[in-house]
Image (tube, grey):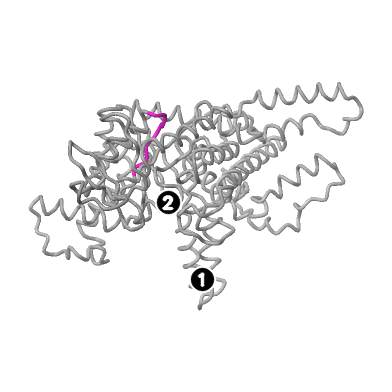
Amino acid sequence: MKNLAQTNYGSALETIRNLKVKYGNTWKAINSENAARMVAQNRFKTGLDIAKYTAGIMREDMAEYDADSSNYTQSLGCWHGFLAQQKMIAIKKHHKTTSKRYLYLSGWMVAALRSEFGPLPDQSMHEKTAVSGLIEEIYDFLRQADAIELNDLFRRLENGEDVQDEIDNFETHVVPIIADIDAGFGNEEATYLLAKKMIKAGACAIQIENQVSDAKQCGHQDGKVTVPHEDFIAKLNAVRYAFLELGVDDGIIVARTDSEGAGLTQKLPVSQEPGDLASQYLAFVDADEIAIEDAKEDDVLIKRDGKLVRPIRLSNGLYRFKDGSNIDRVVLDCITSLQNGADLLWIETPTPNVQQIANMVNRVKEVVPNAKLVYNNSPSFNWTLSFRSQVYEEMLAEGENMTAYDRNNLMDAQYDGSELCHRADKKIKTFQSDGAREAGIFHHLITLPTYHTTALHMNDLTEGYFGEEGMLAYVKGVQRQEIRKGVSCVKHQRMAGSDLGDDHKTFFAGDKALKAGGEKNTSNQFEVKTKNNKVKQKLGVVA
């Protein structure tokens, strides 16, 4: 992907040379090559530049997926810019390209880790600006990764290495981000205002859900309350207007339905004619047939199929949906969203089962053939237990003798080497490709991976460090692994911008610059000789 062409450096160089002629001796200290190099290292000047660029990438990827479902995309949720940066550096190192790899911003993690109130549940109680602030932070770190890697390349070029092609065809760390706006944080005007902040920060794709904004719950918890379609469509419109106002014509809207697990509604919409959206929504509301003389004072009554019915209302004023209506509501939500401006769908499910997801998506595709899904490969699922249970039922149906397995204890480590385990792990391994092929899943993400990996790694380090291993726990479990695996931040000073800053200070102050690099910089300890003992391998260089 040639997304930082040589013409950027060349055109910048020509522009600066012309400016130097225009301003004469007052600009004599400005080196045209250095200034052009800094321009090349900062391709994206604003968040809107990023949003426009990444929206184009997503649109291209969506078209490629429509042509071939093996072209699905993936992301991991990050709650800090540094985590996003290290993720993209690692992707470039291990997979050589960022193509089809995105970032995900989880409202759950913003609430749990980024609120000034302290850790909060996923109920839209955190500050609105924390969302747009995290988007801006993430892209600051990704742009820094670009600058650091390009600075390294320019240094090597100055030292006589033939890296011009790498500079000309440099692939940026900046990739699309799908950002969670929860239920919109208020009415449609509030949604529009926050969407603008998020887009200005760099978001090209905004995910919004059909829950009541002031009663929002995590999609994997109980107590979810959905809104009528008209209310949700108004918020879809608000997001689209925000994209258009800011010139991000290709902006992506991800419409999430929580109807699979939601059994309540706050409002009864007003039907204007039989069969309209309000009428369809009302048909899902649970109600008892009643005679008018049996109605209580202030009862709410509906005429349904020529009969008078009383919607079942809880003591908190919420109305209950009919049991078993959830899947039909999901399908209607999805079709309605796509017909009213949404680009992608998000369906929350109770377990990760490809066939169950496909059953819903295929019903949507009967009406909207190119319907595509963003799917949460959630840590809220017990993946091991879910897939072992699925395989257990499959093996049982195949006539296998299952007496060696305790159906109620399939997580037991004693089964780790069993046939059931091997088959379940294979299904987990191919879940994303299977879902892309069979269930219309365009984008697979894990919402909270960095939340869990941080906790896991801290657990492992503290066990040894505060125990008998002492400092060896850190050296063996962290630093030695960083060195041997070439993790960029093993040279943490450089990753924080020290080398980049040294070069900039030289541009600004010349020989008078006070630089951090030099013989007494302890980071030099991480330059080790390769096996052939001829050239140095500089560990920590962004690959």
Residue 172 appears anywhere in the view: yes
User: Going by the picture, which residue comes out furthest to the bottom?
Assistant: 468
Q: Which residue is mark 1?
A: 462
The three-letter code of the residue at mark 2 reads Lys
The three-letter code of the residue at mark 1 reads Thr
How would you rate the neighbour count of disc 1 (Cα within 10 Å): few for under 14, some for 14-19, many for 20 or more? some
User: Going by the picture, which residue comes out furthest to the left?
Assistant: 399
Q: Which residues are magenta?
A: 340-347
Horizontal side of 235 relative to 165 (left or right) equals left
Q: Position of residue 303 (x, y in %)?
A: 23, 39
Q: Position of residue 109 (x, y in %)?
A: 49, 54
Q: Which residue is mark 2?
A: 216
Residue 487 appears anywhere in the view: no
Quarter occupied by residue 375: top left
Foreground residue, 483 or 506?
506
How would you rate the neighbour count of disc 2 (Cα within 10 Å): few for under 14, some for 14-19, many for 20 or more? many
Tag shown at residue 326:
none
Sequence-wise first label, 1 or 2: 2
Foreground residue, 12 or 141?
141
Check disc 2 and report its element: helix, strand or loop. Answer: loop
Quarter occupied by residue 374: top left
Q: Is residue 327 above or below residue 410?
A: above
Foreground residue, 309 or 366?
309
Q: Position of residue 76 (x, y in %)?
A: 45, 47
User: Going by the picture, which residue comes out furthest to the front?
Assistant: 293
Residue at point 60%, 55% (across, down):
490
- The stretch drawn in magenta includes residue 346: yes
